[in-house]
Each structure stands twice: as structure tokens, then as C-alpha cells.
Image (cartoon, rainbow, N blue to C red):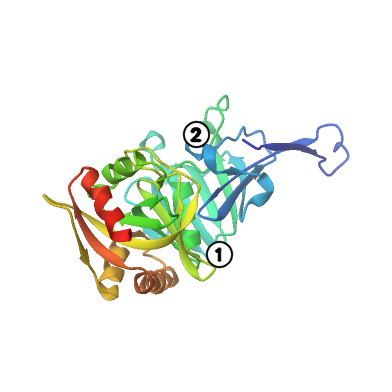
Amino acid sequence: MPIVQTDIACPGAFASSKPKRTQRLAFRVGGTGFGLFSDEEIEMTLDPGLRDFVVEPSMGDIQIRVEWTENLEIPSGEPLFNSGGLWRLFEESDGYRFYFSTPYLGASPYKAAWFDPDFKRGHLVLFRPYFDARKAIYPLEYPLDELLMIHRLACGEGVEMHAVGIVDDAGKGHLFLGHSGAGKSTTARLWKSQPNAHVLSDDRIILRARDGRIWMYGTPWHGDAGIASPESAPLSKLYLLEHSNKTELVSLSPGRAAAELFTRSFVPHHSQKGLQFTLRFLDRVARETPCSIFRFLPDISAVEAICREGA
């Protein structure tokens, strides 16, 4: 894992006696780089699931400073969004702030993260008494890393989908979309056993426009099959997964497809601009990409049906 540690002199008379150590690390998901840096005594690490997504620390499109704090309280005002559990989001004059709580601390949060309106710069503070200083910390611990990705994409860059991404032996991208229990992990396992086929993810896929086409990217946020890849491929076809006692494909109109795509997307519903962009983007995806309902048996016939259609 590329980690850069440098000694930076502090201003003042005693600057040379105790230089600060700056630690930097970074990863890239869906074409966006996340850079973390800290000059405090925080031993940072990345989640093991990000191993294949690590990049050089200088490649972060989103730069986030990480620091300790001894005092952290949730504002008394009404949040912009309340997850009903782990996190709350507040809108501020200069951006947005997330607060993360746990029953262990009662009403006090253990982490807070501020981001500018475009989610390009961030400042993350960790409540020191909550963390074990002897252990390395992943500051963007789930769900913050995925929340940050979703909000950055909604600024006009793309959409994260509840889907499996498959790249066939011809390099074509097939996106199988479904809610929980629709058969995404089953689909991923069936294709993983096929020679020359590559599975990008079994649960989360990012769609972005690139070079005049729609591309799909793997993510580290995998499902039951545990499959995650940093690779990407141009999108060729869309399929809405449905379990059935037979395997068949039923074409959908672009209008119906766009509506179905939206219900399987991750979008910040509290952001009007984010919603408007997502709707426009998914309408483009549906108009440019053939979409079908894919009713299938959980066996090799499901793979064969897709291969026959693309022959």
C-alpha cells in the first residue's frame, strides 16, 4: 500500500526540534481518487477490501485532512438527512457535515466529516477517547467512503447502481441490476466460472460517461459473493434480474428502463441538484443502452441465454 511519510518543520522557535510526520494514502474507485493525509499521531490504514484500489497518494481528486479531537457534539438544529441509525447530515453555509454515532457513546458522535459543496475537499475529525491508539485506523470506515462516493457522483459525474457488472470475452459490459435477493450474487458466481469473463462487482457498480459512451466501473463494496475489481468496461446492455422457473428476456422501452434504473440507484435524495442530475443521466443511459427484464433459472442456462443474445 503506497504510504508517504515526510517530516515537515513546524513554524516557531522550536520548529527544528520536533518535526511533524505527515502520512498520506489514497485509493481510486470509479475513476475518482480519494486522498487522506494527516500530520498528527494517527496511524492510518485502508480497509483490506481496498487493496486492489490503492493508488499513489498524489492522485486524490478528493483531499481529506484527518485529525484528532477531544470534544465532539452533534448540532442542536434539524439535520438535512437522518439515517435513523449511524449517521446524520447537516447543511452548512460552506458545505456539508456528517456526524457518526454509536450507542456506546450515547448522544456523542465518534466521528465528524466536513466537505465543501462539490465534495472536493474534506476535513475529518476523530473523537480520540473512542479509538484505540494502538491500532491503525481507516478514517473513511464504511459507510463514510460510500457516502462520499455517492455525493461526489451526484455533483455531475455519474451514479452508483445496485448491480453486478460482467465483462464478456469480447470486452462488452453487461449490467445486471437488482434489489437485495434478486440474484446478483448468484449471477456473479455463474459468470465467475466462465473462461475469459470478468466480474467487476457482485453488488455495486458505478456508471459514468467517458469518451462519448457510458462506462461501468467495479467498486470495493461487494455483496455475498465477495467479488470486487477496480477495472472498467464500456456498457453494452442492461438487465433487470428476476427469479423464474424459466429463462427469458423481455425488452423494455427507454422510459420504463429509466424508471427501473432509478429505483436501483444510490442517490442523495435530500439534494435537488443531485436528483435532477441523476434523472437526466439515467435517462441518457436508458436511451443509449438496450434494456431487458431477465427472468432466469440459477444455473448455466442463464449465462448461455446472454451469450446467445450477444452472438
Position in image of residue 42 (x %, y %) = 62, 34
Is 20 situated left or right of 72 in this image?
right
> x%, y% of residue 289?
36, 68
Classify 70 as above or below 247.
above
> Which residue is rendered at x = 66% and y = 44% of the image?
56
Residue type for callout 2: Pro
* Helix, strand or loop status at disc 2: helix
Q: Give the numbered dot on residue 48.
A: 2
Viewer-side residue, 76 vs 29: 29
Please give the label number shown on residue 308: none
Report crowding for label 2: few under 14, some 14 to 19, many 20 or more residues within 10 A (C-alpha): few
Q: Quadrant of the C terminus?
A: bottom left
Is residue 264 visible from the viewing direction of this image?
no
Give the CA distance from mark 2 to mark 1: 28 Å
Return the residue nearer the eye: 27 or 98. 27
Label 1: few (<14), some (14–19) or many (≥20) C-alpha neighbours in 10 Å: some
Question: Where does residue 127 sit, x and y in percent of width and height?
Answer: 53, 38
Q: Earlier in the sequence, mark 2 or mark 1?
A: 2
Identity of the amino acid at label 1?
Asp
Write down the residue under mark 1: 118
Residue ID at (34%, 53%)? 163
